[in-house]
Amino acid sequence: MELASLPFRLDALLAAYAGGLTPAAVVAEAHRRLAAIDDPGIFLDLTPPDAMQAEAATLPPFDPVRFPLWGMPVAVKDNIAVAGRPMTAACPAFTHVPEEDAFAVARLRAAGALILGKTNLDQFATGLVGVRTPYPVPRNTADPARVPGGSSSGSAVAVAHGVVVAALGTDTAGSGRVPAALNGIVGLKPSVGAVSSRGMLPACRSLDCISVFATSVDDAWAVFRVIAGEDRADPFSRPIDWAEPGTAPGRIAIPAPGDLHLDDAPGRAAWAAARVLLPGAEEAVITPLLDTAQLLYDGPWIAERAAAFGDFAAAHPGALHPVTQRILDGAARFTAVDAFRGLYRLAEHRRAAENFFARIDVLVVPSAPNFPTLAELDADPIGPNARLGTYTNFVNLLDLAALAVPGPRRPDGLPAGITLIGPRGTDAALAALGAAFAARVAAAEGAQAA
């Protein structure tokens, strides 16, 4: 197979490397693919090709057991530190050059990965649409008139285009899942704390996760396996009991009709097709889970954004994207009393979630209820964004794990997907179910094409 047509997937590249392909050739191909796409919004910084070639030349001898990501080009969201490369968080005035890799990036390198560059995002990881950036907006890979999804827009688009094997994103309210769904790829949002956040610029530090984008569940899991683990230097690191994907969970719930929020007929058709591939799933009322999201956007967790970058904004008036500034301004209305009341309310929601997951193993929901156009965001920069988080906003608040997987496409040809949600520590079980579901989708698509 010619390199130009070689899928940038872990299995395909490892097989090609075993047959004599060189990392130098893959690095050159990654840059060629990016140039051919001609989308200036994907990356905010590229590792110079000669620096990448030099790093590729220092890789140890090929050994995919010891170095499972040997020679794999990966991308990193630009709120995660890569030593010696600029970090902007999509805010030019914030630009600085970290001296050390983030914990997760260091683990990628130790496994043999090669960092192609830093990807665009909703500024300071505040948004789900991917357009809140002063730089060019990454183009959605299915329809450039639609939003790419955020905040990890560049990471998702880079993976969906096949420029990199995988990319790191971050996820506070769905930023590792929504852009995956809107670009037809996998988004793995681990249990909170399973991957160290040291070296990541926080959005809401108590909720943030470093997430993984890939084109398959297997590839996403392979990267997660590399970057997960305890980091005693990160006070928010909370390792999970390790397990590899095995048997898929059996007790599956899906939203009851009253909790099914899908805004257009193509989205409803895609969900109906996905349901067929979830045999035995039972409808359940999930309103108590969905209601938790109000704490994130209408409650005191907005003030945690101010804790993350409010001091910078105060010292640099006019530096923020207008929508980011508007959200930050809203944080001032919350008091310490509001914060404690929010914690009490969250404790009630978490108990309700514990009771819910005592009855089922996994909740399966649509990944997104809408697919906004850029024009809709121009007309209303807040409403469609908030709506996108319907099935994502509550997950980190409730200390749950999640995995976004592509499903049957919408009748209009746009990607659609489902998200699997389970209690903290069920990451492996979600991966097993996600892989099984992906296989059913592929079989159904193959049958239709026959």
Image (spheres, grey):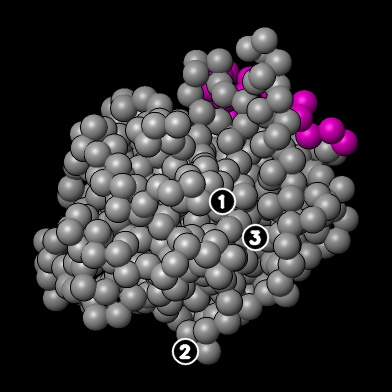
In the rendered structure, the answer to whether residue 134 lies left or right of residue 4 reads left
Secondary structure of the residue carrying tag 2 is: loop
In the rendered structure, the answer to whether residue 388 lies left or right of residue 3 reads right
**Disc on the earlier residue, 1 or 2:** 1
Name, please, the residue furthest toward the bottom. 232
**Disc on the earlier residue, 3 or 1:** 1
> Marks 3 and 1: which is nearer the front?
1
Q: Which residues are magenta?
A: 261-280
Q: Indicate the position of residue 242 as horizontal and vertical percent values.
A: 71, 72
The residue wearing badge 3 is 401
> Marks 1 and 2: which is nearer the front?
1
Q: Residue at x 45, y 31 (%)?
A: 1
Q: Is residue 251 magenta?
A: no
In this rendering, does residue 209 appear at all? no
Q: Residue at x 68, y 29 (%)?
A: 441
What main secondary structure does the magenta stretch of the protein show?
helix
The amino acid at mark 3 is Ala
The amino acid at mark 2 is Ala
Which of the pair 181/324 is nearer the observer?
Answer: 181
Secondary structure of the residue carrying tag 3 is: strand
Q: Residue at x 35, y 33 (%)?
A: 4
Which of the pair 229/280 is nearer the observer?
Answer: 229
Question: Residue 395, relative to residue 41: is it above or below?
Answer: below
Q: Quadrant of residue 428?
A: bottom right
Real-space CA distance between mark 1 and mark 2, rounded to the nearest whole angstrom: 28 Å
Name, please, the residue furthest toward the front. 20
The residue wearing badge 1 is 219
Secondary structure of the residue carrying tag 1 is: helix
Looking at the rendered structure, the number of numbered marks drawn on it comes to 3
**Disc on the earlier residue, 2 or 3:** 2
Q: Indicate the position of residue 406 as horizontal and vertical percent values.
A: 58, 36
The residue wearing badge 2 is 233
